[in-house]
Image: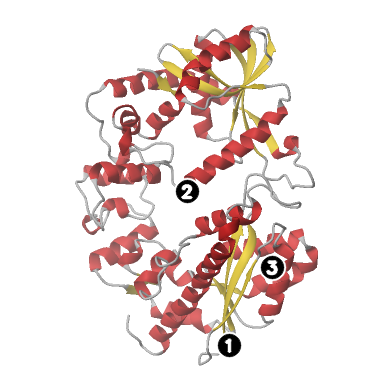
Amino acid sequence: MTISKSEYIMFLKHPAWLWLKKHDKEKIPEPNAILQALFDDGKLFEEYAEKLFPHGVKLGFTGYGDYLSLPKRTQELLDKGEKTIFQGRFEANDITCIVDVLDRVKDNTFDLYEIKSSTKAKIDHEHDLAFQVIVLEKRGLKIRNISVIHVNNEYQRDGKIDVKQLTTITNLNEEVREKIEITKEKIKMAHEIVAQKEMPDPSPRYVGLGALKDWMEIYEIIKGKPEKYSIYNLCSPGVKRLGELEDLGVKLISDIPDDFNLTIKQQRQTMVTKNGSRHLEKESIKSFLNELKYPLYFLDYETFSGVIPAFDGIRPYQQIPFQYSLHILRSPEAELEHKEYLHTENTNPIKPLVEQLKKDIGTKGSILVWYQVFEKGRNKEMGEMFPVYKDFLTEINERIVDLMIPFADGWFCDKEFFGSASIKKVLPVIIPNLSYQELDIQEGNTAQRKWMETIIDGKNSDLKEKIMNNLIEYCKLDTLAMSEIFKYLHNLIEEGGMI
């Protein structure tokens, strides 16, 4: 049975993944919206990268019939002496691959390029290219240079996209050649897996290429959802650690031995899971709250990014704020106020957003965010892009306080957080009456995608007003959630409230 390049990568991620693809592919879920957006970015970058080879001929396929005829069409172009071929397919015995760019140097000697929308060459790309080299050389082609064309995230758009500046070419000759023999061995192992009648052990311990999160989606389809406090719900478990726990026969977090090697976060999670009660360091929380100065501002940005910069002055994948929500508590007894900004035009949102923020936020008082690295980073970048705002945004950063700290530093732990300090984990546990589940937009990736589709791409014009309202409600809940969490902590410490 023939194994393709993408199927070989599945094998490296988990042998059972390849087996399912060949024998029970209904158990492999379709890409979700987030993954599909990554695929779309990759396809878009590929179109730009191909412009580096202006005389290239693109093949590819749109249906199964096209796929089957692709090797023949590829060979015809080679026989004609075509210099550059995009998306040609090659077969060699029981392995096959589609090649992003095959560029003829002379006669039967070629340079091989893989196009990736990442910002650097990765180990996955080396495995990918090693497989391709094996196929091509079995077909009798000579491969001179082996490279990845990837994104240059230092490129800053200025007018029309400059493809040479947008891209970086990284030569991987040495890295790929070192992997040829082991890749041949692994291809043989992959064929042995496919030939098996029974699926190999699906345990997460056998995951490779950092694919644990993706594999767990498939694992739950195969085995069912793990128990709520299973070791598979340990925060950032790592495949090696999961394997060690399986060897010990440990299935639940509460059964992890006290002397087992865990990270600090995992130790906290295990402690509160075993105890069944919260861990509170009230003095640390009290000191944190005492540093805050009224009025309090609860600030959250929503951002967009893309592999191709949408506007001048922007870099690939740079996170650009298009919206903020701001809740204001002027004193402990005051009513909560709300301010907001949402950019609704297909223009760079930074100037109007910062101008509105200057009007909405005062010059004194603590500014609370959740995960300060993000908001501070955006402020720094906006100040660099528009120096007229640099002093204002620097002053904002100097006043920022991270409300995540009591949870991230372990002063407040609950087993229902599952070791996470994400507001999406904390909020439903301590403020259960506030929920993202009732909203049409429930997380940041969806917010970004909906805004870009509607504003940048010009889609959903008949739904624009509804989508904009959904974005407002989502971002508003983020800062309302922070204000309620603050009040909860304040009550807990200052008034000895319920925990």
User: For this view, does 105 lie left or right of residue 245?
Assistant: right
Considering only order in the chain, which callout, 1 or 2, is on the residue closer to the N terminus? 2
Of all residues, the one furthest to the left in this rendering is 249
The residue where tag 1 is placed is: 330
Instruction: From the top left corner, tell me how far across and down residue 112 is, in percent.
Output: 61, 21
Colour scheme: secondary structure
Identify the secondary structure beneath mark 1.
loop
Q: Residue 33 carries which label?
A: 2
Instruction: From the top left corner, tell me how far across and down residue 311 is, in percent.
Output: 73, 52
Specify the quadrant of the image occupied by residue 431.
Answer: bottom left
Instruction: From the top left corner, tell me how far across and down residue 420 is, in percent.
Output: 40, 61
Instruction: From the top left corner, tell me how far across and down residue 20 is, in percent.
Output: 31, 32
User: For this view, does 264 lie left or right of residue 172?
Assistant: left
Q: Which residue is drawn at 64% across and 62% down?
A: 322
Considering only order in the chain, which callout, 3 or 1, is on the residue closer to the N terminus? 1
Q: Nearer the viewer, residue 234 or 296?
A: 296
Q: What residue type is labelled 2?
A: Ala
Considering only order in the chain, which callout, 3 or 2, is on the residue closer to the N terminus? 2
The residue where tag 3 is placed is: 353
